[in-house]
Image: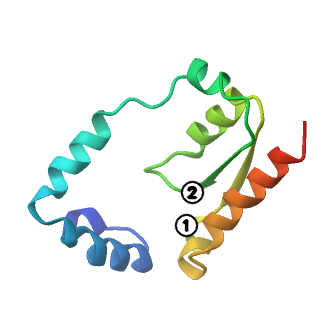
Amino acid sequence: MAAAVAGVDPWLAAELSRAWPTYGAGLADSLVVAADQPAPTAADLASLDVPAGVACCTDDPIHPSEIARTWVDALPRAHLGTTTLAALGADRESLGRAAVLAWLRARFTR
């Protein structure tokens, strides 16, 4: 746990330290399984003709915003909403609001 939270913002370290132990001994295996799952391809995303809101933290090194941008570019009706890890730390709802706002923009823009 110490290695996982080293160098991250205190709010994120506290959140990970609270949440991850609830997985118990299965945490490492769960993370490996998740990492081995392929992301949707651009072709998969291009086939989805529905409004999509994609949100990201622009300063998140683990979940790069370039991937979110790639998904938005592949989806026919998508918008990108952004926030930062600092904003998320101060306001846990900021990422959800970014996603909903992006979805609303996608929904009402054709």
- Residue 74, given in percent of the width and then of the height, sits at 67, 27
Residue depicted at x 58% and y 81%:
90
- Give the Cα separation between the discs numbered 2 and 1: 6 Å
> In the image, what residue type sits under mark 2?
Asp
* Residue 19 sits in quarter: bottom left
- Residue 64, given in percent of the width and then of the height, sits at 52, 45
- Disc 1 element: helix
Q: Is residue 104 above or below residue 78?
A: below
Residue depicted at x 61% and y 27%:
45
* Residue 52 sits in quarter: top right
Question: In the displayed structure, does residue 16 sit left or right of residue 27?
Answer: right
Return the residue nearer the eye: 80 or 66: 80
Return the residue nearer the eye: 79 or 9: 79
> In the image, what residue type sits under mark 1?
Leu
Residue corresponding to mark 2? 59
- Residue 49, given in percent of the width and then of the height, sits at 73, 29
Residue depicted at x 78% and y 35%:
77
Q: Which color scheme does this rendered protein use?
A: rainbow
Question: In the displayed structure, does residue 67 sit left or right of residue 1?
Answer: right
Question: In the displayed structure, does residue 90 sit left or right of residue 110?
Answer: left
- Disc 2 element: loop
Residue sitting farthest toward the top: 43
Q: Are marks 2 and 1 in contact (CB under 8 Å)?
A: yes
Q: Quadrant of the N terminus?
A: bottom left
Return the residue nearer the eye: 7 or 33: 33
User: Of the numbered discs in the image, which one, if any, rests on residue 85?
Assistant: 1
User: Of the numbered discs in the image, which one, if any, rests on residue 14?
Assistant: none
